[in-house]
Amino acid sequence: MADLPFHDRADFDDADRGFIAHLTPAVIKNADGRVVWDGDAYAFLDQECPDSAHPSLWRHGRLCAKQGLYEVADGIYQVRGLDLSNMTLVEGDTGVVVIDPLISTECAAAALKLYRRHRGDRPVTGVVYTHSHVGHFGGVRGVTGGGIPILAPFGFLEHAAAESVYAGPARTRRSLYLYGPALDRSPAGQLGAGLGLAASTGRISLIPPTVHIRRTGQEETVDGVRFTFQLGPGSPPGMVFLLPDRRALCLAANATHSQHDLLDLRGAHVRDPRLWTRCLTETLTLFGGQADVAFASYHWPTWGGENIVRLLSQHRDLHAYLHDQTLRLMSKGLTGAEIAEHMQLPPALEQVWHTHGYHGSTGHNVKAIYQHYMGWFDGNPAHLWEHPPRQSAIRYVECLGGGAAVVALAKGYLAENDLRFAAQLLNHAVFADEGNKEARDLLAEVYTRLGHGAENAAWRNAYLMGALELDDGIVPATGAPGTAVSPDLAAALSVSQIFDAIAVRVDGPRAWNESLSIDWHLTDLGQCFRTTLSNGALIQQMDPPPQPADLTLRLTKAQLLAMLMGRDVEGVDREGDTRVLKRLVAVLDAPVRDFAIVTP
């Protein structure tokens, strides 16, 4: 820690550069008066770093807390610190093109209003979504009602819609641990989320793209603003672009002022760092030397051609190093957990602030790489068929002499400052007997101390949320992006995705003995799907064979969505046994949005 360059103020200079005005107060409310964003709650970050925070994370939080309207380059402006992500505005011939309109419509509208207050009432003449995560599109109806060009990478809509549906309830619950919305904004509580301060909690919207970016090198002009695009790898797809006439490079989320995550702690597909490395190499080849400033969807810009090349090169080297060294150590028989413990970054990368793990981290990125190649099983037969956590905990506690004995042992490790093993012991005690108050209280204390020592914002929030729920019980699943599927996202689902979403709700054992089929004729789309419930699985087929189904429904996609949301729907033509639909609904399971995490 003493070796880190705290004397280097370059990031603070860059974060302040081009400042025009704050949003005062930095509090944004929805139409009902509920606060969806409160940047003023982070004023405490102006203090010196307390013992309850990692100095590096505190420094990063102070940088992320800088908010307002900033000039990035001639005709390019950013609103930062009014949501987890940034909104960038590029002035064109007749109006302004908005890039990544934040998470919530309320925040996007406030950002646009702040811009217009200082740059005039320019109309929004285009929108660019760089990525299909909600922070890059959710606020779009706060800046436009549509009818303008909206650019996005090919495949954007499919990924944006699916993100909130298939594993949505579980990811939403885990997002509470990632972002910590229930934690106090204080030196001892939530002080950031790595990519920014927090995620806003307003209305999420989506307007489908009108222009799809399908290849690297594709050029588009919107309101006189020229874009040259580079598609990124992986799923979901993303893109960066050069504004050649402004000598400005948008890096989206590919290279920011934090190590990115390869596996989002709320749950996601593992990103491939090998492909990420190649993408950054291509960015250097395509755009190196052609930009005087690089800005991103998070954090603050980087000015100067050499500095941009250095930023990209170091992020490229970071991903390559983590990938290659993980594979090297894997080939020596080390497991993901062992590699994460062993991994050290090269000193030249460790000394650079933007490679530090405020959002992603070396530890959990290494485990993600291992998972990408090897899956969950580490090869040890003892781990092949372990008891579930509660059953294992009961047996461990029994072997150790009971709950009181486990707590006594944990106190010993706590006294030796081995917080990690104290947490493991106490976790067993709590899972064996969640009513063991002494174990719960001590585990909450251990989690709090682990959180206060974490450099990674998501780790800090997870530890502190665990402590909170051990003390106060489960926090309701509100205050995280994706808490409920918005109407815009539901409408963006393809019919196939809609039936996928139904299929994952089928209670298999309850449906074992059910057998039924329904034909769904989507009259507005000219499509026909058959869903068949067989052996507890709901199978879908487009353009089914001519054999009759048990029930045939003729309806629009909007009527299908309304029906599945439990609303009464008129005008649906039914043919066959109408009881079949009730039989299907009867075996659908409702997701549990407030499931336990730190207790059994």
Image (cartoon, grey):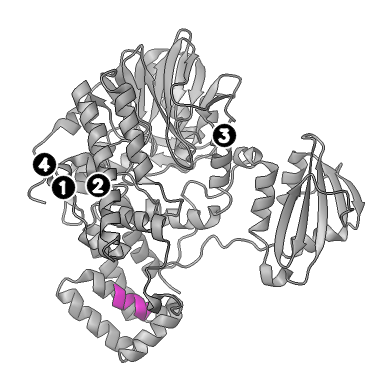
Magenta residues span 424-430
Q: Circle 1 sits on which residue?
A: 346
How far apart are the alpha carbons under marks 2 and 3?
Answer: 37 Å
Image: 298 above or below 459: above
Q: Residues within 10 Å of mark 2 (few under 14, many from 20)?
A: some
Q: Give the SS element for disc 2.
A: helix
Q: Residue at x 36, y 74 (%)?
A: 380
* Dot 3 amino acid type: Leu
Residue 308 x, y percent position in the rendering: 24, 27
Q: Is residue 398 magenta?
A: no
Find the distance from the CA under tag 4 to the CA under tag 1: 19 Å
The answer to the question of whether label 2 and label 1 lie on touching residues, with beta carbons closer than 8 A, is yes
Along the polypeptide, which appears first: circle 3 or circle 1? 3
Q: Mark 1 falls on what kind of element?
A: loop
Which class describes the residues within 10 Å of circle 4: few (<14), some (14-19), or many (20+)? few
Pointer 4: what residue?
6
Say left or right for 550 vs 160: right
Between residue 238 and residue 49, name the one nearer to us: 238
**Dot 2 or dot 1, earlier in sequence:** 2
Q: Which mark is residue 321?
A: 2
Horizontal and vertical percent position of residue 501: 64, 52
First-in-chain label (4 vs 2):
4
